Image (cartoon, rainbow, N blue to C red):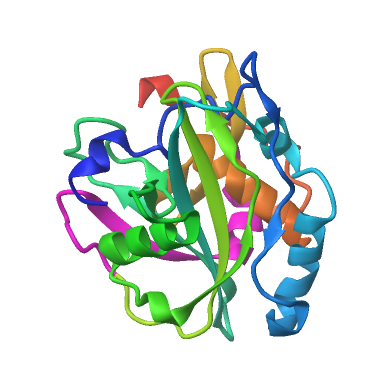
Amino acid sequence: MTARAAEDPTDVGPEVAVEPPDAVLDPAAIPLVGDDEVPHWLRPMIRRSLGGPLPGMLDRGARHRQGGSRQSAVLMLLSEGSESAGPDLLLTQRAATLRTHAGQPAFPGGAIDVGEDAVAAALREGQEETGLDPASVMPLVLMPRLYLPRSEFVVQPVLAYWHTPGPVAPVDPAETALVARVPIADLADPAHRVWGSWGTFVGPAFEVAGMLVWGFTAAIVDALLDLGGWTLPWEFPHTRTIDMSRR
C-alpha cells in the first residue's frame, strides 16, 4: 500500500470477525483455475477450501454487510520453498513508526480501488509492499469475505501460488519493516504457537521470523494450516498466553 497504510484493513485489532445484525452468509470459496493447473501438494488444500465452512475463527467470520462496508483484499501467497525448509507463506510486518497498528505482522493487502477486483488489488498491493512480480503469481481461490467490525472493512482473502519466486523486500521502509517467507513447518511447529489475548479476546498466535503474528492474520494462518493438513497438536503443553494489550 501507499498513503493508505494508516487504514490497513488487515490489522484492525483482535476482532477477527463478528456477525453484524444484517449479515448474510458469504458465498462459498470460488476456484479461479482448474484442478489440473494446481500443484499436486496444494490440491488437498484447495479441495478442502471448496468443500464446506472455513476452519476455526474464519468460519465465524464469513459474513458481510450488504452495503456500506469498505472493500479490500489480502494476498495469501504460498510457494514450494526450498528443499530443506519446504513450502512457505509470505508475510510482512508494518513499520514501527506508522500511526496505527505499528509493528504488526500482516498479509500484503489493502483497499480495492475503483475498477479493480479482489485479485487485481491483492496483486497490486503485493507488488507495492514487497516488490514481487505479479506475473510470478497464480491466483487459485477467492476465499469467502470476512467482515471486520472495528474498521467496517470487508476483506476478501486471495489464495495464490507463487510459481516463480523472486526477491522480495520492503519497498517503502516507512510502511513495511520486514518481508518474510515463513516456512509452513515453522508455523505448524507447536514450539512456535501461543495464544494472544486482548481484553476478552483470545486467539491463536505465532512466534516466527522474529515476529509475533496474531489477530486477523493469525486467524487466517491457523485456517490455512488446517486446510493444508499441516496442523499439529499444540494446545497442551503449549498454552502460553501473551497479553497483546501490553505490547
Q: Which residue is drawn at the image coordinates 55% and 51% (left, top)?
A: 157
User: What's drawn in magenta, residue-wise?
Assistant: 169-194
- Extreme front residue here? 115
Residue 212 is inside the magenta segment: no
Q: Is residue 174 visible?
A: yes
Q: Considering depth in this image, is 55 or 103 the residue closer to the camera?
A: 55
Q: Horizontal and vertical percent for residue 203?
A: 61, 30
Instruction: State which quarter of the image contains the C terminus.
Output: top left
Q: Which residue is drawn at the image coordinates 48% and 54% (left, top)?
A: 118
In the picture shown, does residue 75 fall above or below 42?
above
Describe residue 235's horizontal placement relative to residue 210 as left or right: right
Number of labels in the image equals: 0
Q: Considering depth in this image, is 110 or 215 the residue closer to the camera?
A: 110
Q: Horizontal and vertical percent for residue 114?
A: 34, 49
Based on the displayed image, in which of its 4 quarters is residue 139 positioned? bottom right
In the picture shown, does residue 204 fall above or below 174?
above
Q: Is residue 230 visible?
A: no
Q: Horizontal and vertical percent for residue 234?
A: 73, 45
In the picture shown, does residue 188 fall above or below 77?
above
Q: Considering depth in this image, is 194 or 80 the residue closer to the camera?
A: 80
Residue 191 is inside the magenta segment: yes
Q: Which residue is drawn at the image coordinates 80% and 68% (left, top)?
A: 44
Q: Which residue is drawn at the image coordinates 65% and 32% (left, top)?
A: 61
Based on the displayed image, in which of its 4 quarters is residue 20 positioned? top right
Q: Horizontal and vertical percent for residue 53?
A: 80, 43
Based on the displayed image, in which of its 4 quarters is residue 230 positioned? bottom right
